[in-house]
Image (spheres, rainbow, N blue to C red):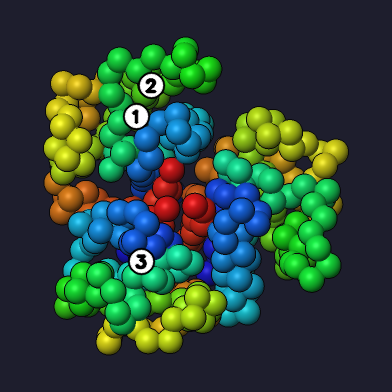
């Protein structure tokens, strides 16, 4: 199951809620305002590092670029819309709106 | 994923918003009632503020919005019997199953996560 | 792969309509069929042909129209959600259609993936 998160963790609890339900190996993709979670500085970097121990984490590059985020937590993979589709080819999707 | 010879799909509706403040729960419920007629394997899970949708004693006359909490009680009549609530979400809000209008199965997040992974489709509301 | 999209948020107010469009474009470019885009909640507002953004901004309704005409993507607005919000056949784009939630159920059954975008 691919989990997408589109909310900044600084604004609401969606990301931390989603993390409680992750199964090991499930990919997590941050999109839209969700990408603020993976900036290499900030309060939630340790949560991202914890998830990275068991799950692959992706962030949508056009959303990072749009928000001026050029450094992400090590291990987080930047992908474009093509990469998003590729993840969907391999997984059903759970959008945490 | 569904068996190739089996057209019944596992569809989970995830309710994560409180009622009334936003329309998502109400229109989500409308969607569930229609889908129920299609004999798919439906389930509904209440997570986060979604559990407030099931709270007893909601009186909406004063806010001028039609109440719909009691419609959840009709789900059973539509054969939508797989209703789950997240244990932590209830505990965090000081709710117990007695505070809720309908019987739900209370599961922990690991169990709900495992159920999510069995689904063909997950629709968030 | 046959892909369905559920879009639950109106245009401009939220990025959901833009992400859904970019995703659909990328899916088509990768050789997939985007079967339908089903509009729900305020998402039904995506198909009003009366939207008139400034020249230098994207025209979201036209994007959906184009996806329909070029790639055969069905652009479907839920009738119950549409009626509530004043969306009807008089105001929708040519490539759009108003339909019931039963159609969404069919989409959920016949597609390999249903991907939801919203707030």
Q: Nearer the viewer, mark 2 or mark 3?
A: 2
Looking at this rendering, what residue extends furthest in the front direction?
A42
Q: Can you identify the residue that label 3 sits on? A: A2
Q: Can you identify the residue that label 2 sits on? A: B69
Residue B63 or residue C61, whichever sits in front: B63
- Residue A3, horizontal then vertical, whole percent: 35, 63
Could you tell me which secondary element the residue under label 1 belongs to?
helix
What residue do we see at 43% from left, 21% from top?
B68
Could you tell me which secondary element the residue under label 2 belongs to?
helix
Question: In this rendering, would B121 be left or right of B82?
Answer: right
Which numbered disc covers residue B53?
1
Identify the chain of the residue marked 1, using the numbered disc in the image: B
Q: Is residue C51 above or below residue C73?
A: above
Task: Please check whether the numbered discs 3 and 1 fall on a single chain.
Answer: no
- Residue B118, horizontal then vertical, whole percent: 28, 55
Q: CA distance from mark 3 to mark 1?
A: 27 Å
Could you tell me which secondary element the residue under label 3 belongs to?
strand
- Residue A8, horizontal then vertical, whole percent: 39, 63
């Amino acid at each position: 199951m691919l989990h997408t998160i589109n909310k900044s963790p600084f604004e609401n609890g969606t990301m931390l809620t989603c993390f409680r339900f992750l199964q090991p190996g499930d990919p997590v993709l941050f999109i839209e305002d969700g990408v603020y979670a993976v900036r290499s500085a900030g309060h939630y970097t340790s949560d991202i590092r914890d998830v990275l121990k068991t799950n692959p984490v992706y962030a949508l590059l056009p959303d990072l670029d749009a928000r001026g985020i050029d450094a992400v937590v090590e291990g987080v993979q930047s992908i474009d819309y093509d990469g998003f589709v590729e993840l969907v080819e391999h997984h059903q999707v759970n959008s945490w709106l | 994923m569904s068996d190739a010879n089996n057209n019944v799909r596992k569809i989970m509706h995830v309710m994560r918003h409180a009622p009334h403040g936003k329309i998502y729960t109400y229109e989500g419920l409308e969607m569930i009632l229609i889908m129920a007629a299609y004999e798919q394997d439906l389930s509904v899970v209440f997570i986060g503020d979604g559990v407030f949708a099931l709270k007893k004693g909601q009186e909406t006359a004063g806010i001028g919005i039609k109440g719909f909490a009691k419609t959840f009680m009709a789900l059973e009549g539509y054969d939508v019997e797989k209703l789950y609530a997240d244990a932590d979400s209830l505990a965090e809000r000081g709710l117990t199953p007695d505070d809720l209008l309908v019987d739900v199965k209370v599961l922990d997040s690991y169990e709900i996560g495992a159920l999510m992974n069995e689904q063909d489709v997950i629709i968030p509301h | 792969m046959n892909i369905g999209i559920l879009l639950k948020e109106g245009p401009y107010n939220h990025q959901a309509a833009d992400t859904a469009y970019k995703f659909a474009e990328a899916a088509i470019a990768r050789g997939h069929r985007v079967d339908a885009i089903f509009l729900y909640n305020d998402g039904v507002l995506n198909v009003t042909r009366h939207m008139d953004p400034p020249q230098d901004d994207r025209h979201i309704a036209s994007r959906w129209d184009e996806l329909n005409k070029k790639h055969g993507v069905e652009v479907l607005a839920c009738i119950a959600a549409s009626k509530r919000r004043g969306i009807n056949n008089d105001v929708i784009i040519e490539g759009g259609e108003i339909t019931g939630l039963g159609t969404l159920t069919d989409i959920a059954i016949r597609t390999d993936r249903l991907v939801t975008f919203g707030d």
